[in-house]
Image (cartoon, helix red, strand yellow):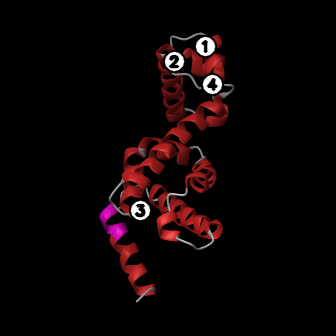
């Protein structure tokens, strides 16, 4: 994705990302073409390629933006990580459901594995311990919570899930 702070470019990127998400509602991601994305917008094909290199680049941009918001919330929220996870999921429910429907939810895990170690929002929890395995442990836990919740249709109450996890953590660390 080409980064630009030009308002026209920002508007075009939004139209393109919205078009891809709209198409993913009704079509398998693998069958969506750049041409279809462009036809869903008032933009020209040239504008698409001025902003993105491919439909995968568009999807990566959408996921990257969501993960960035998650990391900011994780590092700035007074709430614990579990609350932040569920706020992230609830805010991004539409995206998570589309990714799951298209068997692309794993892309979220891949992005978490890239972004989290760079920013290391778990630094306070890890302290002087070797971060590599502990970050992977935290990302794995976050991923599995998100995946299970989405896989179950996101119908379970976040408060009930948090309570279950907190009770489990108390039991393994009496």
User: Mark 4, residues whose alpha carbon is within 10 Å: few (<14), some, or many (≥20)?
Assistant: few
Mark 4 or mark 3: whose residue is earlier in sequence:
4
Q: Residue furthest right?
A: 53
Membership of 112 in magenta stretch? no
In the displayed structure, 156 sits above or below 33; it is below
Say which mark, if any, is on residue 2. Answer: 4
Q: Residue furthest front?
A: 128
Q: From which residue to which does the magenta span run?
A: 157-162
Residue tagged by mark 3? 81
Q: Are marks 1 and 2 in contact (CB under 8 Å)?
A: yes
Crowding around mark 3 (Cα neighbors within 10 Å: few <14, some 14 to 19, many 20+) is some
SS state under label 1:
helix
Q: Is residue 161 magenta?
A: yes
Residue 21, how many percent across, how many down?
51, 32
Query: Does the image show residue 45?
Result: yes
Tag 2 near tag 4, CB within 8 Å: no
**Number of numbered markers:** 4
């Amino acid at each position: 994705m080409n980064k630009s702070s030009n308002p026209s470019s920002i508007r075009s990127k939004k139209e393109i990302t919205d078009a891809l998400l709209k198409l993913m509602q009704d079509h398998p991601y693998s069958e969506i073409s750049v041409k279809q994305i462009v036809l869903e917008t008032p933009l020209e094909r040239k504008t698409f390629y001025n902003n993105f290199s491919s439909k995968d680049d568009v999807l990566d941009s959408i996921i990257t933006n969501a993960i960035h918001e998650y990391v900011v919330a994780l590092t700035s929220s007074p709430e614990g990580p579990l609350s932040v996870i569920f706020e992230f999921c609830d805010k991004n429910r539409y995206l998570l459901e589309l990714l799951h429907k298209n068997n692309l939810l794993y892309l979220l895990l891949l992005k978490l594995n890239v972004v989290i170690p760079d920013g290391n929002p778990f630094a306070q929890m890890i302290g002087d311990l070797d971060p590599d395995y502990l970050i992977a442990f935290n990302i794995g836990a976050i991923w599995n919570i998100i995946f299970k919740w989405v896989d179950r249709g996101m119908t379970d109450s976040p408060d009930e899930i948090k309570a279950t996890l907190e009770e489990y953590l108390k039991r393994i660390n009496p």
